[in-house]
Image (cartoon, rainbow, N blue to C red):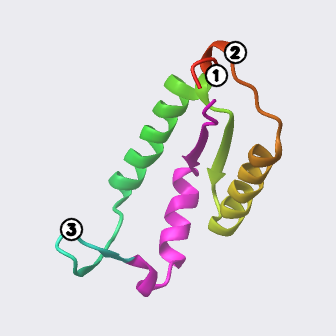
């Protein structure tokens, strides 16, 4: 069975603060052409990110087994590792009809 983890956006205010405090070298991303580019987020892009995150959570949240808010990269990463560890160690089941053909 799939286990669905949703990493949702933090609040607009938190995103704005985190983008202001992010070092310049961390804002560089690889472009499709393979060169590094400085990636900046405008307030409208950040607002769009928050709105899309809310829409996804509202429309598909009933499918999520776990939701992690990406307020802090280290905390979100640690939580993702912890959740995946729990899933790996938990007893899983599948309907008998799924495994009869194996």
Asked whether, in this view, residue 64 is left or right of residue 90, the answer is left
Q: Nearer the viewer, residue 65 or 72?
A: 65
Q: Which of 75 and 101 is in front in this view?
A: 101
Residue marked by disc 1 = 99
Q: How far apart are marks 2 and 1 (CA)?
A: 5 Å
Q: Distance between the residues labelled 2 and 3?
A: 45 Å
Q: Nearer the viewer, residue 12 or 10?
A: 10
Residue 96 on image: x %, y %: 69, 15
Q: Distance between the residues labelled 1 and 3?
A: 42 Å
Residue 31 on image: x %, y %: 24, 71
Q: In this view, does 52 lie above or below 22?
A: above
Residue at x 58% of width, y 52% of height: 10
Secondary element under disc 3, as helix, strand or loop, is: loop
Crowding at label 3, few (<14), some or many (≥20) Cα neighbours within 10 Å? few
Secondary element under disc 1, as helix, strand or loop, is: helix
Are circles 1 and 3 on residues that touch, CB within 8 Å?
Answer: no
Residue 73 on image: x %, y %: 62, 66
Residue marked by disc 3 = 32
Asked whether, in this view, residue 8 is left or right of residue 67, the answer is left
Are circles 2 and 1 on residues that touch, CB within 8 Å?
Answer: yes
Q: In which quarter of the image is residue 37?
A: bottom left
Residue marked by disc 2 = 96
Magenta span covers which residues?
1-27
Residue 80 on image: x %, y %: 68, 55
Q: In which quarter of the image is residue 33?
A: bottom left
Residue 89 within the magenta-colored segment of the rendering: no
């Amino acid at each position: 069975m799939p286990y669905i983890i949703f990493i949702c956006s933090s609040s607009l205010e938190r995103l704005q603060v985190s983008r202001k405090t992010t070092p310049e070298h961390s804002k560089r991303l690889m472009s499709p052409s393979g060169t590094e580019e400085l990636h900046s987020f405008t307030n409208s892009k950040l607002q769009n990110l928050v709105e899309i995150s809310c829409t996804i959570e509202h429309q598909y949240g009933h499918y999520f087994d776990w939701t992690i808010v990406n307020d802090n990269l280290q905390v979100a990463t640690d939580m993702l590792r912890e959740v995946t560890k729990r899933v790996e160690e938990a007893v899983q089941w599948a309907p008998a009809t799924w495994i009869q053909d194996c």
